[in-house]
Image (spheres, helix red, strand yellow):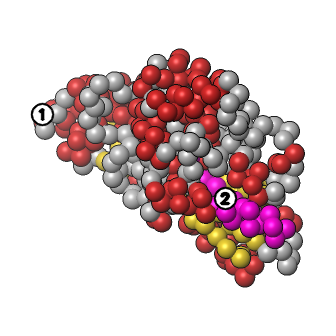
Amino acid sequence: MRRDLDALIAAAIRACDARHLTWRALTRHARLLPPETPLYVVAAGKAATPMLRAFEQAYGARIRAHVVAAPDTGCGHPVPNDASVDAGRRALTMAADARRAGAPLVVLLSGGASALLAVPAEPLTLAEKIAATRVLLRSGLPIAAINGVRRHLSGIKGGRLAAAAGRTITFAISDVHAPVEDDPAAIGSGPTVADPSTFGDVLDALRSGGVLDEMPAAVREHLARGASGERAETVKPGDPRLAGSEYLLVGSRRDAMDGVGAEARARGYTVERIEAPTLGEAREAARAFIADGRARVASAAQPLCIVASGETTVRIEGTAGTGGRNQEFALAAALDGVASDGWALASVGTDGIDGPTDAAGAVVDASTLDRARAHSLDAASSLRGHDAYPFFHALGDLIVTGPTGTNVGDVQILLCRPV
C-alpha cells in the first residue's frame, strides 16, 4: 500500500501544478488582457515562480517590469525577512508606475505571500513584525484570525497594493479553507481585495487566543491606536479605489483531490471524498478522520481510498520538539486506529514543506507502532512533545518531496482493504 500512497501523493501534487493551473486560467480568461496593453506583474507566494513562467509564456513580450516574492528569490517564509520587505516596497513602486502608465498591475498570488511579500505598517519595524509573526505561528489561532492580524500590521496587504495601482487583475491559487473557503481577503492576506475585518476584530482575536500580551509593545500600541481611529484602516468593501480590480481563483485544494481520485480509480480503488475541509488541531482532526474512515469501510466491498484536504493547526505550549502539522496528524492517526490490518494513511503538504522540517508529511500503516517499539520509540510521548519528525525519520516513514512550487494546503489519504 505504501507504493500506492506514493503514487497518489505524486498525483495530488501534479494536479495542482502552479504553471498548469495558471496557463489554464490565462487560456480561459484571455479577454481580461486585451492586445497591445503593457503589463506590470507582481508574483508573490510559494507558487510565484511557476505562475510567472506561465504568464511569461503567454504575455512575455508585453511585460514592462516584474517583481517576484518567492522562496527561491530569497524572501522569507514563514517569517518575513529583508528580502520580503524589499520585494514589497518594489511592488508598491511598480503599482504606482502602472497607475501612471494607465496599465493594469497583474498579481499572481499564492499561499505564503503573507510572509514573502511584506511591508511593515508605519511605524512598525521588520524586527517587530518578525516577533509578532513568531507569536502567531505558535498561537494555534485559526488561519483567518492570523491573516486578519497580518493585514493590520502591513502596508501592502488588506487591499493596499490594489489601491496604489488603480487597476489590478489577480490570478490566485488558494490555500485558504476556513472560515470562508478560498476567501480572497485571506489568500496572501489579500493585497488586492477589500478587507472586512477591523483593528477591533484583531484585538479581540488576540485576546481570545490568549496571546495579546505576548505581542511586542509597539504592535500592541499600533493595534490599539488603530482601534481608536488613530491609524488608517485597511481598504474596506465598497472603496472606490478597488473599482477597477478583478480577481480570479485559478486553483485550490479540490484540484489536488481530483488528482488523487483519478489515480486511485486507475489503481482499482473506490474513491470517497470528504468535501468539508480538514481543520482544527491536527491530532483531533486525525481522530475524526479515522472515525469517519471506520464508518465508511464498514460497508465497503472493494478497496477504498478516502481523500480529504484542508489545513490543521498545532498549538504549542512550552517546549516542543521537531515536526509539523502533517507529521502530527499521521502520528495521531497511528495511535488511533491505523494499526488496523489493511489500512495505510498519508498526510502531506502540497507545498512540500511541513513545519520547520525538510519533510512534506508522513505515512503510517499497520506496522508503524510495532516497528516503533522495535526502535524503542514511544509514539504517545512523541505526540505529546510535538516531536514527530525524529519518530518518523527513524522509521523511514517521512514523505520528502522538496519544495513543489505550489500550495493548496494539505491532503490526507486513507487506503483501506475490507477484511
Q: How far, Cα to Cα, is label 1 from label 2?
A: 54 Å
| Residue appearing at x 29%, y 46% in the figure | 397
Quarter of the C terminus within the rendering: top left
Judging depth in this view, the residue of 60 and 157 nearest the camera is 157
Q: Secondary structure at mark 2?
A: helix
Residue 331 in the image: above or below residue 20: above
Q: Specify whether residue 58 is in view.
A: yes
Earlier residue among tags 1 and 2: 2
Q: Amino acid at mark 1?
A: Ser
Whether the residues at callouts 1 and 2 have beta carbons within 8 Å, the answer is no
- Identify the residue position indicated by label 2 in the image: 92
Residue 4's x, y, as percent? Answer: 42, 51
Q: Which residue is tagged 1? A: 376
Q: Is residue 417 in view?
A: no
Q: Circle 1: is it few (<14), some (14-19), or many (20+) Cα within 10 Å?
A: few
User: Left of 160 or right of it: where is 68?
Assistant: left
**Left or right of 233, for residue 86:** left
Residue 335 is situated, as x and y percent measured from the top left of the image, at 31, 26
Q: Secondary structure at mark 1?
A: loop
- Write the residue at 19% across / 35% down: 372
Disc nearest the viewer among 1 and 2 = 2
